[in-house]
Image (cartoon, rainbow, N blue to C red):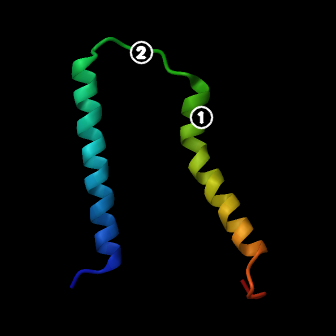
Amino acid sequence: MLTSKLILVTFTWVIAFLVSICLRAAGIAHPNPFHVNQFLVWFLVFAPSFCLLIYFLVKRFFSLDPSL
């Protein structure tokens, strides 16, 4: 029986596979190295975690149930 977790995991793997194929194709099309902005790298690494932290703090602050 399919569950929502199985669907989510499958969807995540399919998206990751497609991104991998696209990055591989881009690497073949443009083989020269490129310069990476360090700020962009750190932003991509830490921004999702920071956004989730803000989301959970705001959700907790505005929660109607005091036990959460």
Q: Residue at x 60, y 45 (%)?
A: 47
Which residue is found at the position 78% from the left and 73% from the top? Answer: 61
Quarter of the image with the C terminus is: bottom right
Label count reads 2
The three-letter amino acid code for the residue at tag 1 is Trp
Quarter of the figure that contains the N terminus? bottom left
Q: For residue 51, what is the image quadrant?
A: bottom right
Query: Residue 6: horizontal and vertical position, in percent?
Result: 29, 73
Which mark sits nearer the N-terminus, 2 or 1? 2
User: Which SS class for mark 1?
Assistant: helix
Q: Residue furthest top?
A: 32
Task: Count neighbours of disc 2 (C-alpha within 10 A) and say few if under 14, some if 14 to 19, many if 20 or more.
Answer: few
From the image, tell me which residue sits under label 1: 42
Q: Residue at x 23, y 19 (%)?
A: 29
Mark 2 residue type:
Phe
Q: Which residue is mark 2?
A: 34
User: In the drawing, does residue 21 fall left or right of residue 38?
Assistant: left
**Mark 2 vs mark 1, CA separation in Å:** 17 Å
Residue 59 % position (x, y): 70, 72
Q: Is residue 5 left or right of residue 10?
A: right
For residue 43, what is the image quadrant?
top right
